[in-house]
Amino acid sequence: MKILYKLTLLVTSFLMITGCNDYLNINDDPNNPTDAPLSGLMARTSFETGDNVQNVGSITSFYVQYLASPNPASSTDVMEPIPYDQTWFELYDVMTDISDMQVLATEEEASHYLGIANILQAINLGLTVDMWGSIPYSEAFFAQSITPPYDDDQQLYSEILSLLNEGITLLSAPNTNDSFEPATDDFIYEGDVSLWIKAANALRARYLLHESETPSFNAQSVLSATDAGFDASEENATVSYFDVQINPWALVAINNEDLLLGGWISEQLIESMDGTTYGYVDPRMPYMFGTTDEGVFIGVENGAGRGDAAEQGDRSYLVEGGYYTSRTSSLEIITFSEQKFIEAEAALRASNPTRAYQAYLDGIESHMQTIGVPQEEILIYLNNPLVAVGSGNLTLDLIFKEKYIALFLNPETYNDARRYDFQYEDMTVAANLNPDLNGNFATRLVYPDSETQRNSGNVPTVTLLDKIWWDQ
Amino acid sequence: MKKFFTFWMISWLVCASIVTYAQQRTVTGKVTDAEGNSMPGVSVVIDQTTQGTVTGPDGVYTLEVPVGSETLVFSFIGYTTQQIAVGNQTTINVTLEEDVTQLQEVVVTAFGVEQQKRSLGYSVQSLDGAEIAKTQQPNLVNALQGQVAGVQITNSGGAPGMSSRILIRGVTSLNPSGDNQPLFVVDGIQIDNSTFESSGTPRGLSNRVADLNPNDIASINVLKGAAATALYGVRAANGAIIITTKKGKSGQLQVNFKSSFGVEEVNHYPEFQQKYGQGFSGEYQPTSFWPSYGAPVEAVQQIEPGYRMYETTKEVMQTGKIYDNYLSVSGGGENSTIFASLSYFDQEGVIPFSDWQRVSAKLSGSVAVSNKFEVQGSMVYSNSGGMRVPHDRIMETLQYWSYSRDPKDYINPDGSQNTYGNTNPLYAARFQTYEDNVDRFIGNINLKYNVSDWLSFNYRIGLDVYSDQREEITPGPLGVANETPLSSTGFIEETRINSRNLTSTFIATVNKDITDRLNATFRVGNDVFDLRRNNIVARGNEFVVPRFYHLSNVTEQLTGQFITERRLIGLYGDLTLNYDDFLFLNITGRNDWSSTLPEENRSFFYSSINLGFVFSDLWEMPAFIDYGKFRASYAEVGKDTDPYQTQLVYTTTDPLNGQVGFTRSNVLGSDQLTPERTSSIEFGLDMTMLENRLGFDLTWYKSNSADQILQVPVSNATGYTRLILNAGELENKGLELVLRGTPVRTADFTWEATLNFTRNRNTVVDIRDGIESIVVGRQFGYVGSSTTMQLIEGDPYGNLYGTSYQRYYPNGTPEGLTELDRDRPIVIGADGFPVRNVNQLIIGNAQPDWIAGLSNTLTYKDFVLSFLIDTRIGVDQFSQYDNFYAAFGQLDYSLDRNAVVVFDGVQSDGSRNDIPVWLGQGIGPDGSNYGASFYRNSFRGVSENFVQDASFVKLRNISLSYNLGQNLISRTPFRSASLTVSANNIILWTPWQSFDPESFSAGAGGNATAFTGLGYPGVSSYFLTLNLSL
């Protein structure tokens, strides 16, 4: 009996202990999956890449004076050293998800997913490097270190180009795993591999052109990239928006209408289009932004604020509707029009003015068509002798002037502006400019607080007047 | 002492029987307790003699009183002695009140164990039901305000049913979202006190303890330090509130009825200007957005007769109403007792359309099955909820609403919004609805088995379940002509929170006298806690058909779900040694197994030791000292974490064009987490003197919470924003004093007073290397005046960072300056205006320097006056109200808007500023353009202007009761009757400029208490209460 009693005790204790462990094994998160499918990562990253272009564009649009704040001395207008934590976070958030997509696509041998992932990574990495220069990359995204080291920005440019090249190679070959073929989860091209290859070539041209002020610049390689790029505006790399997730610039316009002021147009842009600066009117204004209640276009001087103008009806700002600001407007990453201006600049630098001139005209026309300018108005503009100067008279100034209009709201213009040393006609620094800039335009962003506070040992010390490697 | 009393009683009994007087008369009467129960064994003595008697089993006494004797003295152990003048009376009925200051005070400690307070080596403070009920607070948490040392309670605002936050001995967690509030235990089982705020604009939801009816409470014991809560383990690392509900008593049936009616009003308004109306730049503009930058009222009246100003905020606020009705029945026979109660509480708030109701029903009983086995049980059902107006939106739109338009005229005949362009505050209040409806059941069964006189078993199982159903509706366009809808789309959101807590507790107790003088009590037990919560949200956007608000009538539907499960198993032992009733040693140990920690670290052990030494029993004391005890304790408590902190997960995004996006969670869990550890040391001295007329409990403590499990912010380049790690230590040190006194005690008049004083200091001892700060919260302020509460190693918890005016340092601003020195002169720029310093400096701290409550009870014959003064000193808060008011020129200080002033300060070279500037808008008298005015350009953008001293002295409660005297009551069917008038929450003093400073927007569960937001204004309430008992 005693043995039986002891045995029972032993067995019940054992049951209790194992039972307890089972009872306590409930800490696997029931709310969130521990794995992500490739299509889920693609949906997220392709869509958010568009948001990232807009995030960066909402900073650079003030720096290049597309937009101006209705309030005097607004910190973006006057280029204060603002730590853009949210923008930095969004970029790294997307690059992290793309890194997961790269790992998973490699595991699954899903070569087309990997190819698109590489191109998306190049776009986001390019946006980040162009704003901040050296950033953490080679030891980033997987918590290898809680204080990731910084990679040199010039080396990161090689990485951008090799990501694009790898993407092109992978997408040019047949998919190695037919179970994973990108489709509607890709909010940019719905899985159309040939368009991704063209976009990757256009992007290669863009990043190669950034080196225009460096010894490594090679105009021919830019031109061979544009040759493999887009053939029409219909092939533009854009992100789709939907009624339930509206275009972020449309949101700026709607908020402004609700008196959360934003999206006011800079005097610089309006004067360069309304005849003030160049003596002729650009027909694109009504397709890009609104008029005052009196039906005229009036901008706000950057840094000066709206003065005694009312909140509504006295100035031009983004208004809902139209190409850039409809709820379901697509958001441009890179366009045929931009590629044409890249080609024009490269050809001109390569002393091929004929090619440059045609590309210049094509760039203007394709932008005008895209935003809905009627053909007769396009022709009037393209026949204006101040625009149609002829190949012999084409200058870099004209290319930059027209590219500036055609890339409205796109962050790429800030890269152009820095390469061009802000030599746009009549462009001056903002009123109330941050005095530390000594009258100069800022040539980069300062690092975000999240880096200076949490990665202080690695983050370089910079000022707004320091330059990205290609800006020499 | 007991023996002494027995001896004393017997001796005068003997005396009484021997000594007789010639001239005598017979006085009879009955002695009852506060609840009307007969009190047998009460001594009744003729003052200054040894003559007297004791009451019989029915509480009745008869005593021969010689002529010339004036006073009878009624006394019973544990009750306040009463002296009654005899006069010509022959019937003297007496009600004895329990004396909480008595030495034999019994307190309820961990797991419902009742212990003599003298035996404890740590600090415990208790309140009885009467002290709770008299506060007239519908939320039990508020009823503790100012009544317990070491406890800080803050209303989150004045809305009906709005949550209140309770902290014992300060914040213990560095985690911005960590729970710092104590465990709540009702009749031995843990109950939920979560506050789930609304997901959109703040609505002021309830903390779940508000479901309890305070009238059902018999007593509350507050266990403060780790030593007191060591047995509860992980769940009580922030202290514990042990609530005992009312039970039936053997004896006759008792019926109590209480009915209360109250009104409430806003207790503190900012000083609004009433001169400048709608418009900008001093111009009258009748459709302008700007409510008060226009022309002076007299000027407009010249051109527009009938133009007038409204005090918009005061016009909108109404008188709130409170109804509270309560009925209880209790009784019992020889072997069983029963208690039942019903209550209905209904409150209408000061903002129109806000209300809250609570219905509760309680049944509890006990049966002694045999003299060894007893069964007790209790269940409470409550239904609560109300209309939660979007107070933050209402108070914001009220600021924009023109001063010259009647804010009460809010709706057009067709049901659309009456507006000139801005959102109409009252229209939003009525139609942007959010209603919650909570059904809750709390029940427990308790089995007690006394095996022998030295061994007993106790098992208790308890259940706390609730379903919280919420519906939020913002209408879209109504489909009428020319309307201004509240939203262009409208939406409906249905939220369902289902929660279930299960607690199982087993305790075996051994009690043995080891020697004549040494007694040992040993307890060993097990408890299991099991939580499951399922939160489901369904949202529909954009109504298809106007005015039909249903999830089916929308163009877009979104859903979400969050499940929480947590389980805990504990095993513990507790040994108490009692040497001759003056030296007490208590040792505890507990092992926990928690589901929330990684499997290999889920088991952890900790222990405590405490000592109570009643030195007045051992050493000869001066005559005036009645009692003195020294206590000391050291305790460690382990703590687990929230569920699901150990993994890496992905989160999904709302479907877009049929695609669900996946993104890696920004928070990386860790499978290496170890339990947090709090070690705490406490010393105390309790004394009473002057025949119990003066007493104090003094406590010093220090508590260190180390290895805290935090979501540590990291470089985003890691792929995460936060990593979950054991990464920090917080120290709390403090002093608590409870001072009790009876300054006056005569036959007719007594005055009793209690002071509770608390001073807590804390320091962020350690944050893991590489992490420079932890942001607890941030609140928006205009143009750079947003203010941040953040934690930095070496600094106290609660520091507020923001922009300030530049201060003058003769040798230049020191490198690495972290704190604003308000005493230094302000630097004035070349433009004549103060220079703004955009570097984030420490501009205040949200933790009080000290808090204190002084409660007084004055009794004169049948009248009782009591009042409680509650004070908190040295609290800084960011006043978002004032920031907004400044931006819109609303307060009377902005009346200097057209003045030319010379700002007090120095120029950059240190010389006195002498530049005159104009404060107005546009072109000034000197011809310069001053833009949008000083208040808009500069003042509103400086955090320093809005981080203000939120100290206060409040009359938390004052009440005057009249108890119907025995002569009168004996002619009625009632056992007792009283009428009380009372008032709550009257601000006696505060330097704060806006509404009641006791307000914060995070809700009771949030730690960012420094931010008032545009909170629901605080209120004062006034009550008339009738109590009857049969």
Image (tube, helix red, strand yellow):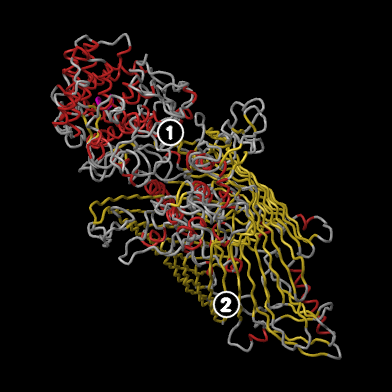
* Residue B985, x across and y down, in percent: 59, 62
Disc sitting over residue B1027 in the figure: 2
Element assignment for label 1: loop
Residue at horizontal 24%, vertical 44%? Answer: B655
Q: Is residue B175 above or below residue B354?
A: above
Mark 1 is surrounded, within 10 Å at the Cα level, by few (under 14), some (14 to 19) or many (20 or more) other residues, namely many
Count of labels in the image: 2
Q: Which image quarter: residue B622?
A: bottom right
Secondary structure character of the magenta stretch overall: helix
The foreground one among B792 and A435 is A435
Q: Is residue B213 above or below residue B96?
A: above
Chain that bears disc 2 = B
* Residue A2, x across and y down, in percent: 45, 53
Magenta span has B551?
Answer: no
Magenta residue span: A118-122
Q: Relative to B996, is A24 on the left or the right?
A: left
Q: Which image quarter: residue A182?
A: top left
State which quarter of the image contains the C terminus of chain B: bottom right
Q: Amino acid at mark 2?
A: Asn
The foreground one among A352 and A26 is A352
Q: Amino acid at mark 1?
A: Ala
Residue denoted by label 1: A304
Q: Is residue B323 above or below residue B710?
A: below
State which quarter of the image contains the N terminus of chain B: bottom right
The foreground one among B101 and B259 is B259
